[in-house]
Amino acid sequence: MSLEFKQIEKRVGAETHIYATDLKLEDGGFNILLGTTLSGKTSLLHLMAGLDRPTSGEVWFNGKNVTRAPVQARNVSMVHQQFINYPNFNVFENIASPLRIQRTPAAEIGRRVGEVAELLNLTPLLERSPNELSGGQQQRTALARALVKDSDLVLLDEPLANLDFKLREELRDQLPKMFENRGCTVVYATSEPNEALLLGGHTATLHEGRVTQFGKTEKIYRRPKDLRSAQVFADPPMNTATVTKQGDTFILNERISWPVAESQRSLSDHAYTVGIRPHHISPASGRAGAVPILGEVLITEFSGSESIVHFQIEDRTWVSQAQGIHPFEIGTKAEFFLDTSHCIYFGAGNELVSA
């Protein structure tokens, strides 16, 4: 089931929501739209679904131009971030509703609702109304309604964002399995890089209405084609700085430098932008050869068993993200350790030169 944008653009008044975009999604696979709020994820989903029409360009699905086709003429299911269920229907009828519209025979409705209810652990809840369900159960009901329709295209707009942590982890693990061997194309929008990595498949990174890169999720994470794509795929934000290559050494400042790796020896001697994700800067020495850096502690955050520390080096603020509780006193100097084996280097035009 192929979906392709050909020079698609969406403008609303004087504002451009989606700039001219070419994008061909992975046929019958799991595709992720990754970007921050207002990056264009929901706008792209609405163009795919037919809820909005592009200002210019074309939408092709399964070899047909569907740009002007209304949503009713497309075999599409969409699950939103909010729990959207029919309050006057019980769980069974909520799941069965798209099949009723299609005038599917009652026996077939019963079979298909039973299958997806079993898959999503909803069988004991089929007679309940939505107001008797927890948030997670409501969202599973919405997912079941999308699955039961056997759509060619399933669009998921941050469907786990309003769920508690434990349920999000559970459903995140189940989602790719739900769509295995169903023959549909799935598009999943998220603002969380870790969620994209856990789901796998292919990812399109978005920034301010532009698709900056599309490809296999792990490849984009490890080898972003440019600095913008790397920044989209980092939360907390990627640390960046200007370094200078001099022979066999990268120099950050007069106190901080590290050896050039074998794969980077062909780079010419001049300035580069280095990017390093926060979890590769630790308050503990960790990996052998990690480079010590001294910074002034600005902010400390603790989340469960994780520590996030914002610290300043000269005129830049960097972030360290590490497992364990690492208390620091704000305003003091502290030592952190940079794992340079995970540094990513970008050239003068912010294009990738080495990772």
Image (tube, rainbow, N blue to C red):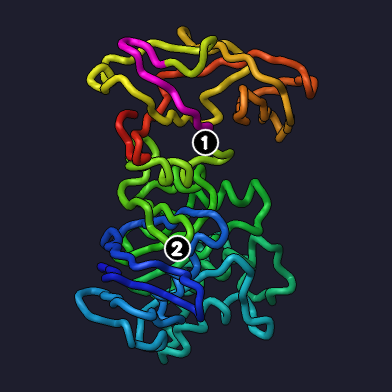
Total number of numbered discs in the rendering:
2
Identify whether 300 is placed above or below 154: above
158 to the left or right of 309? left
Give the CA separation, mark 1 to mark 2: 20 Å
Give me the residue at 37% from left, 11% from top.
249
Could you tell me if residue 218 is visible in this image?
no
The quarter of the image holding the N terminus is bottom left
Give me the residue at 38% from left, 57% from top.
211
Q: Amino acid at mark 2?
A: Gly
> On the image, which quarter does residue 111 sit in?
bottom left
From the viewer's side, name the closer residue of 62 and 113: 62
Main secondary structure of the magenta stretch: strand
From the viewer's side, name the closer residue of 6 and 156: 6
Q: Amino acid at mark 1?
A: Met
Could you tell me if residue 295 is visible in this image?
yes
Residue 205 location (% of width, % of height): 41, 52
Find numbered disc 1 in the image and state the secondary structure of the residue it sits on: loop
Residue 199 location (% of width, % of height): 44, 48
Give me the residue at 44% from left, 73% from top.
148
Identify whether 70 is placed above or below 323: below
Few, some or many C-alpha atoms within 10 Å of disc 2 (few <14, some 14-19, many ≥20)? many
Residue under numbered circle 1: 238
Identify whether 254 is placed above or below 185: above
Q: Which region shows up in magenta?
A: 238-250
